[in-house]
Amino acid sequence: MTGAVAAMSESLTEGKPGLTRGGLDRRLLAAHEAGDKPALVRLYAEAADHANDLDAACFYLTHAYIFALDAGHADAPKLHARLKAEGREA
């Protein structure tokens, strides 16, 4: 996991099972190692849903959106709409 992703994961809500650094980080690492782009879309969207602030949420949404575009994932338009709604995408 990149340093930026690790740093942003501090913005996740602490103490929630599966969303703590050990839970979500572990699943993200496994998905990255496996090259599982559909899982990366889902996991980054999950991280966005549980982020404590808008900047962190949009950071994760951007990652989810990029992986969705790369994989031709059906959620790409929905992720794009979320980014647009937050003023992060034209």
Image (spheres, rainbow, N blue to C red):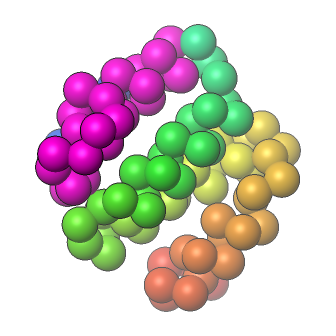
Residue for point 50% across, 60% down: 61
Residue for point 22% across, 34% down: 21
**Is residue 45 visible in the rendered structure shown here?**
yes
**Is residue 60 visible in the rendered structure shown here?**
no
Compared across the picture, whether 2 is left or right of 34 comes to left
**In this rendering, is residue 67 above or below 33?**
below
31 in the magenta segment: yes
Point out the stretch of residues depicted in magenta: 9-33
Q: How many labels does the image show?
A: 0
Main SS, magenta region, reads helix
Q: In this rendered view, identify the residue nearer to me: 19 or 87.
A: 19
**In this rendering, is residue 53 above or below 28?**
below
Compared across the picture, whether 90 is left or right of 8 comes to right
Q: In this rendered view, identify the residue nearer to me: 16 or 58.
A: 16
Residue farthest front in this picture: 17
Residue 29 placement: quadrant:
top left
19 in the magenta segment: yes
Q: In which quarter of the image is the C terminus?
A: bottom right
Residue 19 pos. (x, y %): 31, 42
Compared across the picture, whether 34 is left or right of 28 comes to right
Q: In which quarter of the image is the N terminus?
A: top left
Residue 2 pos. (x, y %): 31, 30
Compared across the picture, whether 22 is left or right of 36 comes to left
Residue for point 29% across, 38% down: 17
Residue 82 pos. (x, y %): 59, 76
Residue 28 placement: quadrant:
top left
Residue for point 15% across, 49% down: 14
**In this rendering, is residue 60 above or below 28?**
below
